[in-house]
Amino acid sequence: MRRTNPATLRATGLSLGDTLLRQVLQFGFSIFLARLLAPEEFGVLAMLYVFIGLASALSEGGLGAALIQNQDSNPAQESSVFQFNAAAGLAMTLLLFASAPAIERFYDYPGLAAITMAMALNVFINALGAIHGALVIRELRIGLQLRIGVISSTVSGVVAVVMAWQGHGVWSLVVQTLLASTLTTALLWAWHGWRPRHAFSIAALRPLLRYGSALMLSGLLDLVVGRLYTVLIGRFYGAAPLGLYMRAVTTQNLPQMMVGAVMRQVAFPVLAASRADLAEVRRSSRLALRASMLLQTPCLLGIAATAESLVPLLFGRGWMPSVPILQVLCIAGCLYPISHVNLTVLKALGRSGIFLRLEAMKKGAALALLLAAAPFGLLAIAWSQVCSALLAVLWNASHADRLVGYGLGTQARDAAPSLALAAGMAMVVWETGRHLDLPNATTLAIQVPLGIAIYVAGCFLFRMARIDDLRHYLKSLAGPTAVTIDDNG
């Protein structure tokens, strides 16, 4: 039997706590802001997501992931990465400044140029702390992430709520974003000891660029195609419909952000460190998929089942048009854990070239689906996301099968029990809500405990060893263990 690493296991627990706390804080502030601001004001900021995201991805260059994947980087490489990020971040910020009037004309929304310039500053601020953030993840200093995340989220959230209450509208959201980035970067510099010490060296940077550039290009594809709906909705439907759609997206994202972030923060660097042991990568991947499905599917389908009571209770009745969009997106969200595990395997094994080719295939299909759906309204766009997620699962699994022997059939067997039980639970919860003529808070007070009881009871009744999977998964992140998984599921 091989031992677990207590320090890494502790880091996994801290990562989960950090993610949960930050998401709860951010979601809590978003509830207050949604009640103080109109959907249009959220939509205005969403119009810029693609432009700001592109600038951020180009300034980072995939070098943060390259540093995490390369466990043996030297000071010359790290300093060169910092200088590259800072220079590229400044260049992208200035380019956004110059493009701001054109972006305003494109959307035909007065005042958008000034908002674009303000948000452009975020690109440079994040670039100054990018290497510190990558090193913190690689070193598994999750406690430091926890402190920084809580402080930046709390301070920026409180300021945004106060500004919204005083009538500053969309600028409260702009200030929230800028303040969170500024605090995060400042605290990373204050609490992490790394400092740039060497002159810029393209030779030192070249090995990292070979790996990082492929990830950057795949990230650009993901951003452009994955967020193109914000451009299409904003341009052809307006800011208010875009705000409604984004409310559905952010609500649907909450469960996967809570669980998926643990994979990003801990599983990737740990799997990268043990990438020579393919059997261990396969074992940990199976445990990760089972554990993720156990947690995410009941949350997502539970949100879909309770959305008609949940949305007006949390955000107000003005957000009710987002309910059907949210319900459809929750279906797509159930497929994301499967793809995320497969992509983490590719990144951990250093197969960035395959990663890029795979992303190009998926995004090409997603773009075609999105463009075909866009003329038919917001709900059609949401269904195109479901189709894209299904295609992504099929293509991602084929590469995991070839590299580590974890193919679609085995993945389907690992995912099916949690998905089937969660779907049955959601149907009962939804049908119960339909027959209750009660206030939203009372209806939710009945639906949520009912759903939890059905799901937990089902796990025991059908002898689903998913709770053990969670425990084994945490141990597998800390190091190879004697855990054995039956290949037949």
Image (cartoon, rainbow, N blue to C red):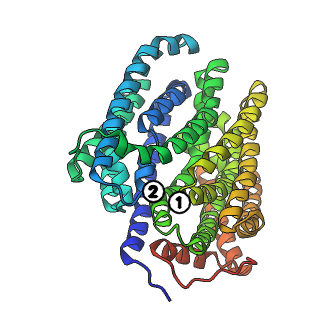
57, 24: nearer the viewer: 57
Left or right placement of residue 289 versus residue 258 in this view: right
Residue 7 percent location from the top left of the image:
36, 73
Q: Say the numbered circle drawn on residue 69.
A: 2
Q: Which residue is drawn at 43% across and 67% down?
A: 12
Question: Tag 2: residue type?
Answer: Gln
269, 39: nearer the viewer: 269
Q: Which residue is drawn at 40% across and 52% down?
A: 67
Residue 425 percent location from the top left of the image:
73, 64
Q: Are marks 1 and 2 in contact (CB under 8 Å)?
A: yes
- Measure the C-alpha gap from mark 1 to mark 2: 7 Å
- SS at badge 2: helix
Residue 428: name its quadrant.
Answer: bottom right
Residue 460: name its quadrant.
Answer: bottom right
Q: Who comes first in sequence, dot 1 or dot 2?
A: 2
Residue 42 percent location from the top left of the image:
51, 29
Callout count: 2
Residue 196: name its quadrant.
Answer: top left
111, 68: nearer the viewer: 68
Classify 10 Å Cα crowding around label 1: few (below 14), some (14-19), many (20 and above).
many
Q: Say the numbered circle drawn on residue 132.
A: none
Q: Which residue is drawn at 71% across and 74% down?
A: 458
Q: Quadrant of the C terminus?
A: bottom right
Question: Tag 1: residue type?
Answer: Ala
Residue 255 percent location from the top left of the image:
56, 54
Residue bearing the label numbered 1: 348
Left or right placement of residue 477 versus residue 107 in this view: left
Classify 10 Å Cα crowding around label 2: few (below 14), some (14-19), many (20 and above).
many
Can residue 389 be seen in this snapshot?
Answer: yes
Can residue 167 be seen in this snapshot?
Answer: no
- SS at badge 1: helix
